Image (cartoon, grey):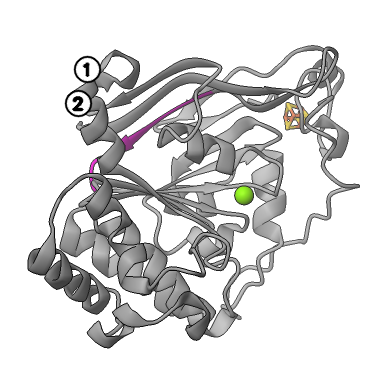
């Protein structure tokens, strides 16, 4: 199978002071196939944004490797590095914070076009108009400023800016979490259409499994810097193996009245601090199935069923 992106034993640590280290991303491996949408889910503080930012090169990894189209990104020459930087793009959660309020929308969208010298003059202008239309806005919007737009429109501007440099792989970091529920579906549908039109691959980050269910081919679940479970999307919903995934799923309201009623699993307490995570399994302080071994040994990452991975001593 053809992987566009492979992450091997990636870690990203932040050293706060001599004694304190936050293991935001701790020994994570995953592979993403060309053309798929990989949903990455976890509570805030689980390290999912850190993983996304490290993958697109916004920050260096502490250890581990990232392969893009089979090549270790650390081993690229300058020219290839520039191409890879262009092809890996990120869309941020908060469209307010990520758009410069003093720049016209057209210039915001063209930032990457200018930086990579992809077009100038009339060609640049035409490209801006084309991008605006692609994301459901209009050419006359190019002369306006971000504050003149709604939250949903601002996210469309952010998407146009990412598309401007002809990316191949996009990390969408909670692109709909800050938006009204009524427009979340519109933005999801836009991203899904653009994926087909532009031949994109997505790493789609969300804090809620319900948000990624319909768009993801596969899903990974993170907790305190660790990957807990990973499988095909349908498989994960039908057969969740990890107690954390089971709890997340039980919290999604079931809209089908004929479906078997799932018992809501309420987790005790808040997630512990990633500065001093629990020994052994990081989920053990909230896990209804925790056993003695869970405090002593870190569960290994195992393929329990075909293409269905989890890290839990129950398996
Ligand atoms: Fe629960 Fe133990 Fe599995 Fe962790 S390893 S999820 S504590 S049963
Ligand atoms: Mg985040």
Give whichever of 213, 226 is nearer the camera.
Answer: 226
State which quarter of the image contains the N terminus: top left
* Residue 29 lies within the magenta run: yes
In this figure, which residue is indicated by the disc labeled 2? 80
Q: Position of residue 110 (x, y in %)?
A: 27, 61
In this figure, which residue is indicated by the disc labeled 1? 77
**Region rendered in magenta:** 28-35
Question: Is the shortest distance between ligand 2 and the CB of mark 1 under 8 Å?
Answer: no
Say whether residue 250 is left or right of residue 123: right
Say whether residue 227 is left or right of residue 102: right
Is 127 placed above or below 293 here? below
Q: Is residue 104 visible?
A: yes
Q: Position of residue 215 (x, y in %)?
A: 39, 61
| Residue pictured at 37% horizontal, 72% vertical | 105
Q: Residues within 10 Å of mark 1 (few under 14, many from 20)?
A: few
Report the magenta stretch's main SS: strand
State which quarter of the image contains the C terminus: top right
């Amino acid at each position: 199978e053809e992987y566009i992106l492979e992450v091997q034993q990636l870690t990203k640590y932040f050293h706060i002071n001599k004694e304190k280290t936050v293991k935001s991303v701790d020994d994570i491996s995953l592979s993403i196939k060309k053309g798929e949408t990989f949903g990455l889910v976890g509570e805030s503080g689980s390290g999912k944004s850190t993983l996304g930012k490290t993958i697109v090169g916004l920050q260096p990894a502490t250890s581990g490797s990232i392969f893009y189209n089979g090549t270790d990104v650390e081993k690229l020459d300058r020219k290839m590095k520039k191409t890879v930087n262009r092809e890996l793009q990120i869309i941020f959660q908060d469209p307010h914070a990520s758009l410069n309020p003093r720049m016209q929308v057209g210039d915001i969208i063209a930032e990457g076009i200018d930086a990579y010298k992809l077009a100038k003059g009339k060609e640049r202008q035409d490209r801006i108009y084309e991008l605006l239309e692609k994301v459901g806005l209009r050419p006359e919007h190019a002369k306006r400023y971000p504050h003149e737009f709604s939250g949903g429109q601002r996210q469309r501007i952010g998407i146009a800016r990412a598309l401007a440099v002809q990316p191949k792989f996009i990390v969408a970091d909670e692109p709909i979490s800050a938006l009204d529920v009524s427009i979340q579906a519109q933005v999801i549908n836009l991203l899904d259409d653009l994926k087909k039109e532009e031949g994109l691959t997505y790493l789609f980050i969300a804090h809620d499994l319900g948000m990624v269910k319909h768009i993801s081919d596969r899903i990974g679940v993170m907790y305190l810097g660790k990957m807990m479970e990973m499988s095909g999307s349908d498989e994960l919903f039908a057969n969740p193996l990890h107690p954390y995934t089971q709890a997340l799923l039980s919290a999604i309201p079931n809209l089908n009245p004929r479906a078997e009623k799932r018992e809501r699993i309420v987790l005790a307490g808040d997630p512990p601090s990633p500065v001093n995570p629990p020994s052994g399994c990081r989920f053990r302080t909230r896990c209804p199935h925790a056993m003695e071994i869970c405090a002593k040994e870190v569960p290994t990452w195992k393929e329990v069923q075909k293409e269905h991975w989890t890290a839990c001593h129950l398996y």
